[in-house]
Image (tube, rainbow, N blue to C red):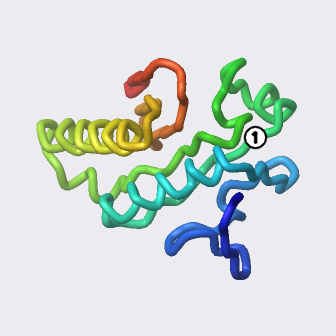
Amino acid sequence: MLKIQVYDGQITEHFNIKEFACKANMEVLLNAEVLDHIFRLEKFRVWYGRPMIINSGYRTPEYNKKIGGAEKSKHMKGIAADFALPMEELKKYDKSRIEEFYNNIKNKWFKLCEADGINGGVGFYDTFIHLDSRTDEQAFWDERK
């Protein structure tokens, strides 16, 4: 049985369900796996200590294909989120501090996933970070230029 309370779309302290809606049609996918992912993101957000602007949550298969998403994207299962990097904050860091920032994010996400008995995925990009709650093998990729 799922126990969840949603008030005006607020699903956790820091996230509103609208943030995870497909950008094409505002469709939302909700099931136990998706809720677990969002609750895991909430734990991450508390640790992260700064706002997380979700650029992409759930994607319909049609929208995922249209934007060139991976054929088996976890976004289509509602268990992936891309969030914007704090670019102004990162400008203040030297290269080693930036790498520490990224590694801390990767390590924290994998620890949260491990605590929940899953593997998780982390992807780094120039302006955002991808976090997913995959149950198959752990995945990490770095597409920064």
Q: Would you call the spot at circle 1 few (<14 residues within 10 Å), some (14-19), or many (20 or more)?
A: many
In screen coordinates, is 61 left or right of 86?
right
- Which quadrant of the rendered structure holds the N terminus? bottom right
Residue located beneath label 1 in the image: 59
In screen coordinates, is 59 left or right of 45?
right
Of residues 145 and 43, the one nearer the viewer is: 43
Give the residue type that dot 1 points to: Arg
Q: Give the residue drawn at x 47%, y 18%.
A: 137
User: Please, is residue 84 above or below residue 143 in the view?
Assistant: below
Return the x and y of residue 23 as percentages of the image width and height.
77, 50
Return the x and y of residue 41 as percentages of the image width and height.
48, 54
Q: Residue 11 sits in which quadrant?
A: bottom right
User: Please, is residue 69 above or below residue 53 in the view?
Assistant: above
Q: Give the residue drawn at x 31%, y 40%.
A: 111
User: Please, is residue 99 above or below residue 71 in the view?
Assistant: below
Q: Give the residue drawn at x 36%, y 53%.
A: 87
Return the x and y of residue 49 as percentages of the image width and height.
31, 66
